[in-house]
Amino acid sequence: MIEIPGLENYIAQFPVYEYRTISTDILYAEPRVRMVCKQECERYGTTWACPPGVGELEECERFFHTYPQGLFFSTVAEVRDVLDMEEMLGTRQAHEEITGQIADYMTQKDLDTFVLSTESCDICEQCTYPEKPCRFPEKMHPCLEGYGIVVPEIVEREQMEYMLGGNAVLWFSLILFRKKE
Ligand code: SF4
């Protein structure tokens, strides 16, 4: 197992609800997850962070297995009304910023990282997809589901919470990591 020195202290400053270091051996790309993206998500095919822009499912699976481990975690946010989709989605950006900061910390600890996170990318007002390459490939976080990853399965396996109820929202990220060459 690769250690991440000081992670516990570093992470304590954020509203991280739970985290686990997992082996990517347990991960696989599930076609039905991507099918849900295609059939139910309006962002499908609109950014480089979503399928099909992230590549074929087999490629995605091969890619995430090039990292032996991942830091899987949730952050928690409070909303006034959990049924207010706009308010709920408004809390996503804070999760992405925390994810970016934790990934930067891991990079400083001599690790190569790749972030998979929530939904799709909205860094640019107008995404370049599909005409031109992504403007900020190092900043954008493709969504876990686009890579076929079944988030509830990891949550169950790791005995984590998927939903808290009340007015709390949980967001999930997976920071893949390996030692720098
Ligand atoms: S960073 Fe910009 S160009 Fe890249 S996926 Fe996000 S919105 Fe599109």
Image: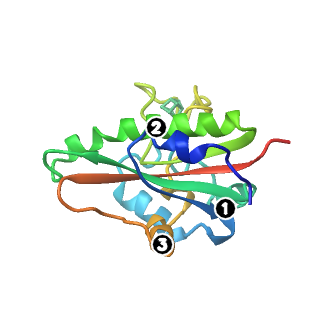
How far, Cα to Cα, is label 2 from label 3? 23 Å
Query: Which residue occupies the foreground of this view, 149 or 41?
Result: 149
Residue at screen point 47% across, 64% down:
151
Q: Are marks 2 and 1 in contact (CB under 8 Å)?
A: no
Q: Position of residue 47 (x, y in %)?
A: 49, 39
Q: Position of residue 167 (x, y in %)?
A: 18, 53
Q: Nearer the viewer, mark 2 or mark 1?
A: 2
Disc 1 versus disc 3: nearer the observer: 3
Task: Look at mark 2 in the image and give the residue it sits on.
Answer: 98
**Farthest residue toward the right?**
181
Q: What amino acid type is highlighted by mark number 1?
A: Glu
Say which mark, if any, is on residue 153.
3
Look at 30% across and 40% down and name the residue there.
91
Which element type, helix, strand or loop, lies under badge 1? Answer: helix
Disc 3 marks which amino acid? Glu
Determine which residue is flagged by label 1.
Answer: 61
- Please report whichever mark, 2 or 3, sits nearer to the chain's N-terminal start: 2
How far across and how far down the image is residue 166, in percent? 17, 58
